[in-house]
């Protein structure tokens, strides 16, 4: 092989400006990062698996948390009101006791109130046609209200619930309640009821199935008096001052609490998710996923940096600033995070899709997906700290000792 | 001592002392080195193992700071410079050729040279073109896409020289550039460095143990026990010496 030894090698000849390639090239810092990353494929595979595991775990745990929040508030959200008048000390929506019975008229006579509707919520005993009993949550609303429950009716109709002794249940509770066709009968607190409507995907957060009926039937089946209800759903006039109406309602109804829709939702969610520890367990699961991800990414990035330490030392010797090398490490972290996120999110979405018609409600929203992306990238950057400390401390003099 | 016409001092070291370690185990590796490197010259730095050659090279390359003494490179006085300022000086004015080549194994020949240019803020098509030019200048125009694992030792060292050249530095420091090469490739690399040194705006200093390389030297500095023992110009210039056939 011939060396170009005959002509002097000058700066001008070496750095002539004639255009040869004309093509755009990937920035070297990016190229170096991804080549380092893909150089050791096994190590890269382990990193990505760690991130995927972390993303799936965090996505599913967060999705279950969101699903739980939605489930807990499902009845409240399906029957919106400006205010909910609830018995004093109510912990959550499904912690029912009865108001005294005068609340509706007191509310309707309060300035600024447009309407107030009764809602009955009560525990009841369901006896299956084939035998066996179950506790259910009986929910009754006025059938002529545009906010009447239930929703998502797939068989029968809300109108059918206006007939005496009729109920609606969700199809997911067929096995629990022993009925699965319209017209079938069961017993509710000892009285015969007929299945008149079937809903889809209306499940409670607890193990108690929802059973919907008219307000009159709910009162009759739960033993409430003529004007009694569990909650009053108050709608205000368009120009009413919310705080002054609330103050007046509280003054008139001292044995109750007047909550906004959001307050009632948060109280119910807070009770089930934090006072029972269910939410804490979900958050702990998500945190565990994050920690696993950080440890795996940190370990593999550190190991990759050690593998390439001589190259980084050479770069330092050639005059690379610490920032340049840190950029390479961070790019490796971000690239790993991005690939792990895409794969992990794809798996998480498949899992969420598979859970769609099961008892488990898992939700993925664009906001959650975006937050997870930020968390994943943040996790990988955090995990890169040990590798960054390692490269920043490189002594470039080692290049002469090898 | 005479120097080529138009040559100028590009590196000037005065009273360089380097102490390594801490008392009571400190070792005085360099004991007052005075040295000038001139443009247009290939200077060989020789001496026995442990004499301080590599330490001196590290100081001249702004990788180590002297314990005492003054160092000026391309007119920049290096005392009191921070690590990052020294890195900046290296990036702009010093090119390195290493004994073990120190190429990035995951990058091709042209990408290795482009990486050095990227450090000097030259990127994109211009960097590519300049890197190809540098590789052609060292006779590797046909191997620009070769990965280091597919190259011979001689080829890798030439890529290393191209990388050092591409930044257009005013001084090139080579650490035993022929040590890992067979005789034929070693001589070829030394001849290449001698040609590189013909540029009147650049000085080349090579640390070597290899006496066969003396023929290429414009000047030979011998260092012993941390002091310069001799600085002389050989009677026969390397340009006149026959280069082994490849």
Image (cartoon, helix red, strand yellow):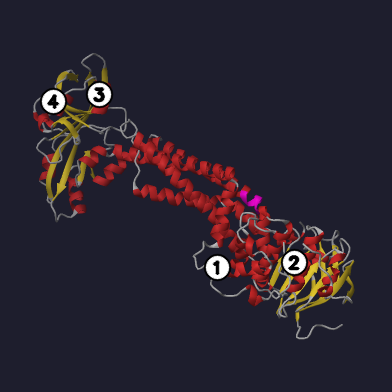
Left or right of A97? Residue A14 is right
Mark on residue A174?
A: 3
Mark on residue B64?
A: 2
Residue toward you, A186 or B93: B93
Span highlighted in magenta in the image: A304-308
Location of residue B105 by image quarter: bottom right
The local crowd at label 4, few if under 14, some if 14 to 19, many if 20 or more residues have their Cα within 10 Å, is many
Foreground tag (4 vs 2)? 2
Foreground tag (4 vs 1)? 1
Q: Is mark 4 on a helix, strand or loop?
A: strand
Do callouts 3 and 1 mark residues in contact (Cβ within 8 Å)?
no
Left or right of B9? Residue A123 is left
Mark toward the start of the polypeptide (4 vs 3): 4
Do callouts 4 and 1 mark residues in contact (Cβ within 8 Å)?
no
Q: Is residue A185 above or below residue A81?
A: above
The chain letter for the residue carrying disc 2 is B
Q: Name the residue under label 1.
A: B123
Q: Quadrant of the N terminus of chain A?
A: bottom right
Foreground tag (4 vs 3)? 3
Q: Does the magenta stretch include residue A307?
A: yes
Mark on residue A389?
A: none
Foreground tag (2 vs 1)? 1
**Where residue B63 appears, x then y in whole percent?**
72, 66
Q: What's the distance in space between the residues labelled 4 and 1, CA to CA?
A: 77 Å
Q: Does the magenta stretch include residue A342?
A: no
Q: Mark 4 points at which residue?
A: A166
Residue found at the far top of this picture: A131
The chain letter for the residue carrying disc 1 is B
- Identified at 61% across, 51% down, the residue is A386
């Amino acid at each position: 092989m011939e060396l170009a030894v005959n002509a002097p090698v000058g700066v001008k000849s070496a750095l002539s400006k004639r255009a040869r390639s004309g093509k755009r090239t990937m920035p070297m810092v990016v190229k170096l990062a991804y080549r380092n990353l893909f150089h050791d494929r096994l190590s890269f595979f382990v990193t990505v698996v760690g991130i995927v595991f972390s993303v799936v775990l965090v996505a599913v745990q967060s999705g279950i948390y969101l699903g739980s929040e939605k489930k807990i508030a499902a009845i409240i959200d399906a029957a919106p009101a400006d205010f909910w008048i609830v018995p004093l000390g109510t912990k959550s929506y499904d912690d029912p006791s009865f108001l005294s019975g005068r609340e509706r008229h007191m509310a309707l006579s309060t300035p600024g109130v447009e309407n107030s509707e009764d809602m009955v919520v009560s525990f009841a005993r369901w006896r299956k046609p084939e035998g066996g009993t179950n506790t259910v949550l009986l929910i009754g609303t006025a059938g002529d209200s545009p906010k009447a429950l239930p929703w998502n009716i797939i068989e029968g109709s809300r109108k059918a619930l206006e007939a005496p002794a009729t109920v609606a249940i969700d199809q997911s509770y067929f096995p629990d309640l022993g009925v699965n066709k319209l017209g079938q009968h069961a017993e509710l607190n000892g009285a015969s009821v007929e299945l008149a409507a079937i809903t889809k995907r209306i499940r409670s957060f607890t193990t108690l199935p929802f059973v919907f009926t008219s307000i009159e039937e709910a009162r009759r089946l739960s033993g409430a008096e003529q004007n009694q209800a569990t909650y009053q759903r108050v709608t205000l006039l368009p120009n009413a001052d919310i705080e002054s109406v609330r103050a007046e309602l509280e003054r008139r109804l001292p044995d109750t609490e007047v909550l906004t829709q959001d307050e009632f939702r948060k109280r119910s969610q807070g009770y089930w998710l934090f006072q029972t520890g269910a939410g804490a367990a979900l958050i702990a699961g998500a945190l565990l996923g994050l920690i696993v991800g950080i440890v795996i990414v940190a370990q593999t990035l550190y190991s990759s940096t050690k593998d390439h330490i001589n190259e980084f030392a050479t770069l330092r010797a050639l005059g690379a600033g610490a920032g340049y090398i840190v950029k390479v490490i961070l790019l490796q972290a971000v690239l790993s995070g991005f690939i792990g996120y895409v794969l992990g999110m794809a798996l998480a979405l498949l899992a969420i899709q598979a859970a769609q018609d099961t008892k488990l409600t898992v939700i993925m929203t664009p906001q959650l997906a975006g937050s997870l992306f930020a968390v994943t990238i943040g996790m990988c950057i955090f995990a890169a700290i040990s590798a960054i400390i390692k490269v920043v401390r490189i002594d470039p003099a080692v290049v002469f000792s090898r | 001592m005479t120097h080529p016409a138009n040559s100028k001092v590009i590196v000037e070291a005065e009273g360089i002392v380097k102490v390594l370690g801490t008392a009571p185990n400190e070792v005085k590796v360099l004991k007052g080195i005075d040295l000038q490197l001139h443009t247009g010259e290939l200077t060989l730095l020789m001496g026995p193992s442990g004499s301080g050659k590599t330490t001196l090279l590290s100081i001249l390359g702004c990788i180590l700071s002297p314990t005492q003494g003054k160092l000026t490179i391309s007119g920049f006085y290096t005392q009191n410079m921070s690590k990052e300022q020294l890195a900046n000086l290296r990036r702009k004015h010093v090119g390195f050729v290493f004994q073990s080549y120190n190429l990035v194994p995951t990058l091709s020949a042209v990408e290795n040279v482009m990486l050095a240019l990227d450090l000097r803020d030259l990127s994109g098509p211009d960097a590519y073109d300049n890197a190809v030019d540098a590789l052609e200048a060292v006779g590797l125009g046909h191997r620009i896409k070769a990965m280091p694992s597919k190259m011979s030792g001689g080829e890798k060292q030439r890529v290393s020289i191209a990388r050092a050249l591409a930044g257009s530095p005013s001084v090139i420091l080579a650490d035993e550039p022929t040590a890992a090469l067979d005789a034929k490739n070693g001589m070829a690399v030394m001849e290449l460095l001698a040609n590189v040194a013909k540029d009147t705006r650049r000085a080349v200093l090579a640390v070597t143990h290899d006496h066969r390389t003396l023929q290429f030297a414009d000047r030979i500095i011998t260092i012993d026990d941390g002091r310069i023992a001799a600085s002389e110009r050989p009677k026969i210039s390397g340009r006149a010496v026959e280069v082994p056939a490849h």
